[in-house]
Amino acid sequence: MRFELGAILRAVRVRAGLSQEELAARLNYNQSDISKFETGAKEPTASTLIKWLKVTNAHEVLVAYLCGLDGIAIMQNILGMFGAA
């Protein structure tokens, strides 16, 4: 589950056009923490997850994740939206 969430977090960051450094600055973390969240080496707190999705304008991802959509369906949605942009 951790890796799945990390991949989703990375995808929404990329979709938002933010580097790890830019996102880290907005979340008051350092770049290495962002990398650890994205690889699953570290789990974000609930408040960090919510901030991440707000900063990346990915509210629909949080709703999908909390409603139990599997990671593949969420990733397909993110990638579909990214490809349409």
Image (cartoon, grey):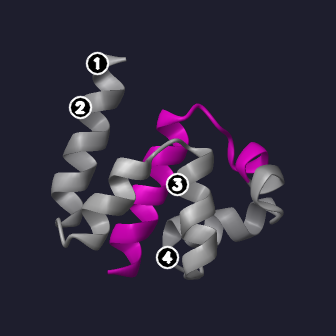
Q: Residue 59 carries which label?
A: none
Cβ atoms under marks 2 and 1 closer than 8 Å:
yes
Image-based side of 45 in relation to 82, left or right: right
Q: How crowded is mark 2: few (under 14 residues within 10 Å), some or many (20 or more)?
A: few
Label located before the other in sequence (4 or 3) = 4
Residue 32: image quadrant is: bottom right
Q: Which kind of residue does numbered mark 4 sit on?
A: Gly
Label located before the other in sequence (3 or 1) = 3
**Residue that carries the numbered disc 2 in the rendered image:** 80
In this rendering, which labeled residue sits more in front, label 4 or label 3?
A: 3
Between residues 36 and 52, which one lies in front from this camera angle? 52
Cβ atoms under marks 3 and 2 closer than 8 Å:
no
What kind of secondary structure does the magenta stretch mostly adopt? helix
Does 40 appear above or below 20?
A: below
* Extent of the magenta region: 1-23
Cβ atoms under marks 3 and 1 closer than 8 Å:
no
Callout 4: SS: loop
